Image (cartoon, rainbow, N blue to C red):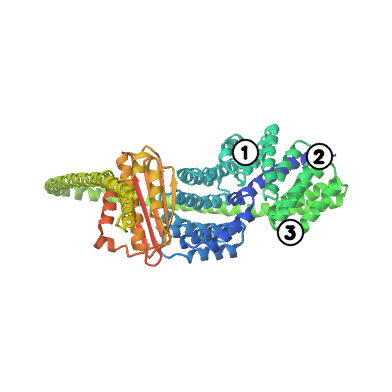
Amino acid sequence: MISKPIKAAVVLCRKGLIILIAFMWSAHILKAQLPLNSRAYHDSLYMALSTQKNDSMKARTAFLLSHYWSIKRDLKKAEKYLITGRSYFKNNRFLLGIYYSTANDVYLDSDVNKARASLLKADSLLAVFHTPDAYINLARTWYSEAIIAQRKSDEKRSLWILVNKVIPFVEKSGDHIILAKYYSQVGILLMNRDLHEKAQEYFSKVIKMKNRLPRKNNTLVRAYIYSAENLTNAGKFPQAKTMLAEARKILDENPGAEDNADYYLVEGSYFEEMKQYPEALRSYDQSAKYAKIIKDIDLENVLVMEKFDVLFETGQFKEAEKLLLQLEKSGYTYKEDNKKELYKQMARVSHALGKNKEAYEWQKKYSTFSDSLYQAQLDRDIVAIEAKFKNSEKEKTIMQLQADKKQEELKSKNQRLTSWILGIAGIALLIGLFFLVYSYKSAKKLSAQKEINHQQRLNEIEQQHHLKLIQEMLDAEERERQRIGRDLHDGLGGMLAGIKMNLTQQQKTEYHNLNTVISRLDESVVELRRIARNMMPESLLKIGLETSLRDLCELLESEETSIIFQAIDIEKNIPDATQIHIYRIVQELLSNAIRHGHPSNIMLQCSQNHDLFYITVEDDGKGFDVSILDKSPGIGFTNIKNRVEYLKGNMDIVSTQGEGTSVNIELDVSS
């Protein structure tokens, strides 16, 4: 017969295990960063690192491998690939930012101070870049700070960082997969606080995105698992069963996925709440099998306690006792809370088996241990009370000193009063003089300020006039390009084509080099059309900016130089004049890279975020000294600078001799 206090202990034990499971998920939250088949993902990265030729790409791949091993908690391998990635570049600001972001992941578990220092460096380096890649790395870096706060049980700060730092960065990047992952983390924090309805809102957000999420990635399956646990805790068992079924479908498509361990744990909790104890034990055994494979000792211990709870509830006291003894030998008691819980449960099961003497001994250990913890807390309370008492005594002393001081002030007040009356006349005179001087200086300062404002206005007018001249110059240049292009294509091009047709219709005569003349005319027509197309791209006027840029890359690509073009969210409603400016900027950047840098690889990335347009050009060419541009800029660079200035943009150039060049441009395309 189970007594009422012991029944209450069962409920408390069950609640404690639920909290422990939730904490375990938050502590291992980085598992959500890997695909379901994590080994295949590692192999693909390892192969890419050995085959990549571009140093920038090699550095990024090495950092991804370092991140992978940090999640697997292999510090040596994580540090190895972190150092390897750093060796592939010297002064690239963006790659240095990714390096510190990755270092933050690597040292998160082993050295919190080092991790935080890396966070601050990554944030300062990447903040100047407004690209999806930069936003993703900033979000990942700040997420580590949320994990640190969670480990300190500061869930309020952890939630604040997620909502105000991490998620806004991911939303800017436009990456739905990563956004879904962080929605799940907010849901977990709310679930830990028993805010089941609010937690379910975030899990539901992820589930609604399922058509955008790849089933090979574990984001969706973990959302179903979290949702099932949350609904089980809230007593909504039919909905929890549905979530488990959806998770099972995905896991069946990916045999051997590590997430099976958490799935079977939640499934066991569901069966236990439904009083289906045999099914619960089978689920816990399955979870233990996967926990052993992935070497998750904490999860294995949690599962032993879960199985003990089921065996005790079903009256299988002998088997329950064996589990606890096994748990004691496994090193479970290395934590004080674990030891206290084990003593309490051993007392319960011994009592249930009729081993009253043993039950008494276990209860005595539990009570002594609890008393020692209580005594330690009591000592801390006494110290706090003593400190409060000392502060009170200090406050009394201070009050007495203040009273004595007031007494002295009262005695000397009458003496000072006479001196004040005598000094009032002098002070009044000084005040009058002060106001005269102040009025004079104020008038002088106001006059100087008016002169400054007038000069600023003149500068603004001059700046506006300068921008107008730049626009007129660029428009005139573009009109002249278009006119020459049309004349070459429609006029001279037509004439050359007509000559070619007449020559081909002529029969062979005494001119033996007629075929040679026709061939050269044909080459001239092709070259003429290439020049006309370069001066006035037809695709830009007909089918838009993205296609024109892609055609430009194909036109400039050669056997010596490979050009990779990435277009992200480029809208079709950009004004025609602005599209031409963007096209000319990219055309000049690519031409400069090929002509001066002689690179093997060029990466061009163009993306748009509402009214902001981003251009990034990276090459592995010879590089150059950027300071030369300030001393003697060429015509091409001046044209780029004028167009960027006209579009109210800014440009950042990073280049090192022998290591290539990186150009980042941000433009305003709102009008």
Instruction: Give the vertical position of 596 relative to 509 (above or below).
Output: below
Q: Nearer the viewer, residue 87 or 322?
A: 87
Residue 331: numbered disc: 3
* Mark found first going from the N terminus, 2 or 3: 2
* Crowdedness near tag 1: few (<14), some (14–19) or many (≥20) residues, C-alpha within 10 Å: some
Q: Which residue is mark 1?
A: 194
* Crowdedness near tag 3: few (<14), some (14–19) or many (≥20) residues, C-alpha within 10 Å: few
Instruction: Find out whether the residues at labels 1 and 2 contact each other: C-beta distance under 8 Å.
Output: no
- Tag 2: amino acid: Ser
* Crowdedness near tag 2: few (<14), some (14–19) or many (≥20) residues, C-alpha within 10 Å: few
Disc 1 from disc 2: Cα separation: 28 Å
Instruction: Find out whether the residues at labels 2 and 3 contact each other: C-beta distance under 8 Å.
Output: no
Q: Nearer the viewer, residue 455 or 160?
A: 455
Q: What is the x, y in percent for residue 19?
A: 66, 45
**Picture residue at 73% right of the left edge, 40% below the top:** 11
The image quadrant where one finds the N terminus is: top right
**Picture residue at 47% right of the left edge, 63% below the top:** 55
Disc 3 from disc 1: Cα separation: 30 Å
Disc 2 from disc 3: Cα separation: 30 Å
Q: Nearer the viewer, residue 154 or 169?
A: 169
Question: Is residue 128 visible in this depiction of the protein?
Answer: no
> SS class of the residue under badge 1?
loop
Q: Which residue is mark 2?
A: 3
Q: Is residue 496 left or right of residue 69?
A: left
